Amino acid sequence: MTLGVLGGMGPVATAEFLRILAVKAPADVDQEHPRMIVYSHTVTPDRTTFILGKGPDPTNYIREGLETLIGWGADMLATTCNTAHYFIDQFRGELSKPVVHIIEETIKVSQQRCAEGAWLTATLGTMRTGLYQKHASDFGYDFKIPSEKMQIEIHDITDLVKAGKQEEAGERYRIVIEELWKIAKLPVVGACTELPIAYQRTGLPVEMGISCLDALAEGCIRELYKPL
């Protein structure tokens, strides 16, 4: 089975996902690792910018990227951008190959880690669409939502990671998380693929961060290595 990865949203997060997938794969030699096709579709317009009414619609770019991967031989699809799934949800049922859905996988991990809930941190696009909350309701799960001011700061942190300013991103993310923990000491979900990278640089306990990249990798491995 071949995994098709639609990446480039952003490039650093895509590279980190591939690293995690390689580390988590139950493989001892090259030949036991997943066969993959990666399409770093960096020309895709910014997802949040469109959702906020300030830029072009990325829907056709995202769909074209996934259809291209299918045409190249992908049997299963994954996209390393949470906000992109707002658009994917609109045509997911029309794709000829299944999607390992980063949001569904992250919610599953959140439930296992902390049944009473978790803090949701994400881009403004993901937060404004209620994307995680809608999927979480299907699982009977509840997220705590940061204030509007914190949401803006968290979005800016994702941009810092995209710009290669990972240390600054980690420091600013740590400040936000410590403020959240004054309200409720719950795990923090990095629900943007840049946020797990920032969390690694916060110096905060590993077990208190829930990575959407880890969750997506684990979901892909489950499906790729599923017994025939």
Image (cartoon, rainbow, N blue to C red):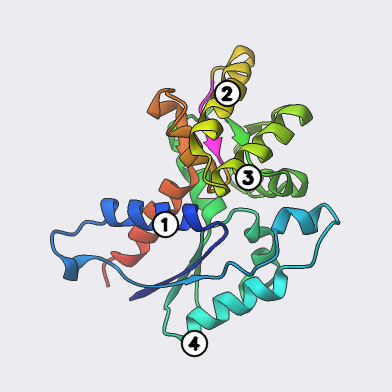
Main SS category, magenta section: strand
Q: Amino acid at mark 4?
A: Gly
Given this view, does label 2 or label 1 mark the residue nearer the observer?
1
Q: Quadrant of the N terminus?
A: bottom left
Q: Are marks 4 and 2 in contact (CB under 8 Å)?
A: no
CA separation in Å, label 4 and label 3: 32 Å
CA separation in Å, label 3 and label 2: 17 Å
* Residue wearing tag 4: 71
Q: Left or right of 91: which side holds 2?
A: left
Q: Which residues are magenta?
A: 186-190
The answer, for residue 116, to whether it is visible in the render is yes
* Residue wearing tag 1: 15
Given this view, does label 4 or label 3 mark the residue nearer the observer?
3
* Residue wearing tag 3: 159
Looking at the image, tell me whether mark 4 or mark 3 is earlier in sequence order.
4
Callout 2: SS: helix
CA separation in Å, label 2 and label 1: 25 Å
Q: Left or right of 206: which side holds 143?
A: right
Looking at the image, tell me whether mark 1 or mark 3 is earlier in sequence order.
1
Callout 1: SS: helix
* Residue wearing tag 2: 177
Looking at the image, tell me whether mark 3 or mark 2 is earlier in sequence order.
3
Q: Amino acid at mark 2?
A: Ile
Looking at the image, tell me whether mark 2 or mark 1 is earlier in sequence order.
1
Q: Amino acid at mark 3?
A: Asp
Q: Amino acid at mark 1?
A: Ala
Callout 3: SS: helix
For image coordinates 50% across by 77% down, the residue present is: 97
Looking at the image, tell me whether mark 4 or mark 2 is earlier in sequence order.
4
